[in-house]
Image: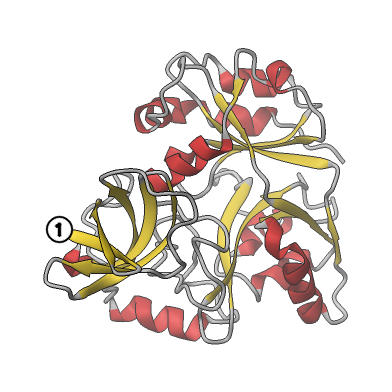
Amino acid sequence: MLVRAGAAAAATATTLPGLRRLWRGGGNGAAACFPLGRALLDVRGAEAALLLQGLLTNDVTRLVAGDGPPPGAAALPRALYAHALNVQGRCLYDVILYRLHENPEEEPRILLECDSGVLDAIQKHLKLYKIRRKVNISPCLDLSLWAIVPGERAGDIAGSLAKCADQALISTPDPRTEVMGWRLITKKGANLSEIIPGSQIGNIQDYHRHRYKQGIPEGVKDLPPGVALPLESNLAYMNGISFTKGCYIGQELTARTHHMGVIRKRLLPVQFLAPLPRDSIPEGAEILTESGKSAGKFRAGGGDLGIALLRLANINEPLCLNIAGDKVKLTASIPEWWPKPASK
């Protein structure tokens, strides 16, 4: 089943000014299309949303047309961001869900985007809790996933997507934050220049640099399974959690932390004074204050940019990364897209 991209694309047109303001990727101003190496799972069946509802932090029922809003209410979302947690409330997988079905008469069908390195693990995780539910789970090897960020002269991207709905199965604003542009799902081998005239295939490293500059975690390097906590990872800021949906695995600790209202550490973008050699920083390398006090841990990065879990009380102090006894200076910043004031 192909999903027409026209309606979703038209709805994104109003976000262009904000996207162009927040994207500072350079280049010639055309739309940058980044081929993502993340995997897609097809989760379909009458109880697909019910299965995911008990495993993910967000309210998956919002994607099910039959349980959607009454006439006149806001349209059903095309995509949702969420985490799957373990029983201790720590992140296992970060996912984006895409709604493929269009009306209550159709069989519910949801595409699940995840880190390709955990594709087998997340399939086993879903099948473990599937039990006898009427759900089919299978990888989508015939589809390609793209991130699209418009430049200053990107033109009418929404209109282009609407005209090429036969090649663009899904086109939707990234559900995490407007700074990340669109997510586009196409058939394998689709011609991006036909779907978005004037667009250019970007270097995936530029996409990651953009993520790190904005403090957007993605994948197991940024969110180590069994280590990362969802609220410290800014899940609420990225529209990835519902505090009213009811029970799901890992909910208890997450809800308690939220209602206490105290989050002392968060993932933040960091910048080094000079580019670091590739793969020179061990996972979880300690970040120190000038006085030698621990301020947090480095997660991942590339060149002179990265992402780190830092104590909010220390982010305005001089900081350095401790690598095999050597101290490399860095600065942390609060992203422009964060809600203000960022008090939690």
Residue 28: where, in percent of width, then height? 46, 14
| Residue 139 located left or right of residue 334 | right
Residue 127: where, in percent of width, then height? 81, 75
Residue 74: where, in percent of width, then height? 54, 45
Q: Quadrant of the C terminus?
A: bottom left
Q: Residues within 10 Å of mark 1 (few under 14, many from 20)?
A: few
Q: In the rendered image, is residue 214 in sight?
A: no
Relative to 112, residue 229 above or below: below
From the image, tell me which residue sits under label 1. 316
Residue 271: where, in percent of width, then height? 30, 48
The foreground one among 92 and 110 is: 92
| Residue 151 located left or right of residue 130 | left
Locate residue 91: give its quadrant: bottom right
Tag 1 secondary structure: loop
Relative to 334, residue 125 above or below: below
Q: Residue at x 45, y 63 (%)?
A: 235
Q: Residue at x 46, y 16 (%)?
A: 29
The foreground one among 66 and 282 is: 282
| Residue 131 located left or right of residue 259 | right
- The amino acid beneath tag 1 is Asn
Q: Residue at x 52, y 86 (%)?
A: 88
Q: Residue at x 74, y 75 (%)?
A: 125
Relative to 36, residue 279 above or below: below
Q: In the rendered image, is residue 4 in sight?
A: yes
| Residue 138 located left or right of residue 218 | right
Relative to 202, residue 218 above or below: below
Q: Quadrant of the N terminus?
A: top right
Locate residue 142: give its quadrant: top right
Number of disc labels:
1
